Image: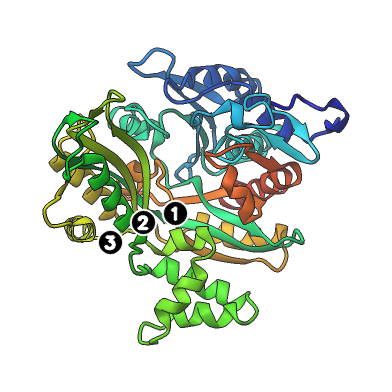
Amino acid sequence: MCLLDTANVLADSPPVAELLSQLIRIDTSNPPGNEAAVAEFLAPRFAQLGFEVEIVKTPEPGKAHLFARLKGDGSKRPVLLTAHADVVGVEAEKWTREPFGGETIDGYVYGRGALDFKGGMAVFAEAVMRLAREKVPLSRDVVFLAAADEESGSFGTDWLADNHWDLINAEFVLNEGGWIIKNANGDVRYVSISTADKISMRLRLIARGTSIHASTPMADNAIFALARALARLEAYDPPPALIPSTRRFFRVLGETSAEPMRGHFFTLLDEDNPERLAAAKVISEDILLHAIMHNTVAPVILEGGFRGNVVPSSASADINFRLVPGTDVDSFIEEIRRVIDEPGHPVEITAPSGIAPELLRDYVEDRLSVPPSSEDTDLFRALERHAPDIYPGALVTSYVFQAATDAFPWRSRGVPVYGIYPYPVETTELQGMHGNDERVGIDSLASGAEMIYRVLLDVAAKR
């Protein structure tokens, strides 16, 4: 692993970058999470600025949520900004920087969570604390939430909604989600604000065969059968599925693209165009755009065998499917069953161990059935209004977020949630999200903090 090159460290990082570095140094890899450490770190910083601070402990030791409320006059309902404090784990040996070092090098902050989502936490926190520092009179409470268990676990925002709804109830919510995408020259191309999320559904494929000595293998080898099923699944590409916000997003991309991509985007939007699938294939060379418009398929865990001289009786693969809102779960599973089917070598489709298939189905269907957040709110309009102020020439669009978030408890109760990663990035930088050498630009953090501050002034300041 490459150690910190002190010659390249930026000496005068803006406060939002310094805050992010400090947050990254608190290892909240989930499991176990240890989000209470973030709550305890942030609590005094908010309290000294006059926020009402509350740390809500969960039944799991070391796991907690932080609320910081800046009081308004109550003439309008609160606006809530939420950022999850937990991060995914790392393969530290594959990083060239210390994953939890929070190093600032060559204009970037490096570390796990820089993009997802401690960078957003730092931006949101800096924006709401600036309201307090500048003593802005407020017409509504502005609430900051550092949430637990977004990446995994049982005590996230669902648990908060069931047990502490009064703390998280608001007129509207700002969360992670859409992207501010810039071109290679640094100009921001578009700002996407997610109004809906794709839904994660993890299924397990199990192939079975005869367990026998490895010296006398039989034709019903479970590992070979699973491998063939996975190969067929790899070759399967579900057709494009465009909900209204996605159609608007691709229309914006068409308007901001040169030929031939401009033509491909508008061909995709034309349901009757015979070249539509060919256009989708070209557009899908961008992995982010592919994920937005398709139900996606990603093997994540393989299991099979227990000794080097025994052919196992079963082999399994866990597949992470990300489904577009409106997908019919039963029809999709039947389609997957058709794709992997091999006469004489059936592969079973079930839920991961410990999860009842019917409960998984109900869980996914509940989330897929929630309508997108309305674009007719003060918060959405404020985001539309102020993003071009900070990023001149950028078009603003709604969007379906390609991953799942913890927005469901609000949306399912009728509270609009809007998602944004509040810092411009190039699409190549997205590979660091849940990957190696995750980083975010310091200038991007600073511009994002300014944008969110202006949005909060718009929706919360007294007029």
Q: Earlier in the sequence, mark 1 or mark 3?
A: 3
Mark seen at residue 460: none
Inter-mark Cα distance, 2 to 1: 19 Å
Q: Earlier in the sequence, mark 3 or mark 2?
A: 2
Mark seen at residue 326: 3
| Residue type at the position of mark 2 | Glu
- Regarding mark 1 in the picture, which secondary structure is present there? loop
In the picture as drawn, the residue positioned furthest to the left comes out as: 344
| Residue 12 horizontal/vertical position (percent) | 85, 32
Quick one: quadrant of the N terminus? Answer: top right
Inter-mark Cα distance, 3 to 2: 23 Å
Give the colouring mode of the picture.
rainbow
* Direction from residue 90 to residue 189 in the image, left or right: right
Residues at badges 3 and 2 in contact (C-beta under 8 Å)? Answer: no
Inter-mark Cα distance, 1 to 3: 14 Å
Residues at badges 1 and 3 in contact (C-beta under 8 Å)? Answer: no
Can see residue 134?
no
In the picture as drawn, the residue positioned furthest to the bottom comes out as: 273
Q: Which residue is mark 1?
A: 402
Q: Quadrant of residue 280?
A: bottom left
Q: Is residue 168 above or below residue 430?
A: above
Q: Which residue is mark 2?
A: 234
Q: Earlier in the sequence, mark 2 or mark 1?
A: 2
* Comparing labels 2 and 1, the label whose residue is closer to the camera: 2
